[in-house]
Image (tube, rainbow, N blue to C red):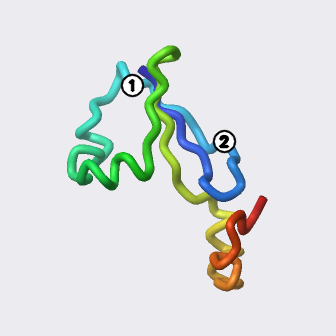
């Protein structure tokens, strides 16, 4: 099962981890509460893929310099 990381703001692809070569726990997902997992992860049963929302460097910088962007529904799209 692949684990795909993408930016939750601009939807940029950030990378993929081969889930067969690592464990769910070694990535730190096991310490998340069920609500936190639901908030940042999506499971695609058809493709056997987990999609993880994170923030790319570009969006992190933009939001740090312009925090008012967080008040809009789609700050960086």
Residue placed at 44% from the left, 30% from the top? 43
- Is the C terminus in the top left, top right, bottom left or bottom right quadrant? bottom right
Looking at the image, which residue sits at the far right? 77
- Quick one: SS at disc 2? strand
Which residue does the image show at 75% across and 64% down from the upper left? 76
Point out the residue furthest to the front here.
Answer: 73
Q: Which mark is residue 34?
A: none
Count of picture labels: 2
Where residue 62 appears, x then y in whole percent? 71, 74
Q: Is residue 33 left or right of residue 74?
A: left
Disc 1 target residue? 19
Residue 40: x and y in percent read 44, 50
Cα distance between the residues tagged 1 and 2: 17 Å
Q: Is residue 77 above or below residue 45?
A: below
Q: Is residue 46 above or below residue 19?
A: above
Name the residue that disc number 2 marks: 13
Mark 1 element type: helix
Where is residue 38? Give x, y as percent: 37, 46
Does 29 sit above or below residue 3? below
Image point 64% across, 63% down: which residue? Answer: 57
Nearest to the observer: residue 40 or residue 5 = 40
**On-image quarter of the N terminus:** top left
Say which residue appears at 52% left-offset and 54% top-offset: 54
Disc with the residue nearer the chain's start (1 vs 2): 2
């Amino acid at each position: 099962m692949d684990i795909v990381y993408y930016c939750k703001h601009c939807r940029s692809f950030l990378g993929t981890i081969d889930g067969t070569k690592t464990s769910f726990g070694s990535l730190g997902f096991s310490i998340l509460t069920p609500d936190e997992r639901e908030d940042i992860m999506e499971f695609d049963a058809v493709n056997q893929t987990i999609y993880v929302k994170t923030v790319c460097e570009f969006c992190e910088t933009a939001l740090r310099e312009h925090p008012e962007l967080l008040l809009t529904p789609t700050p960086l799209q």
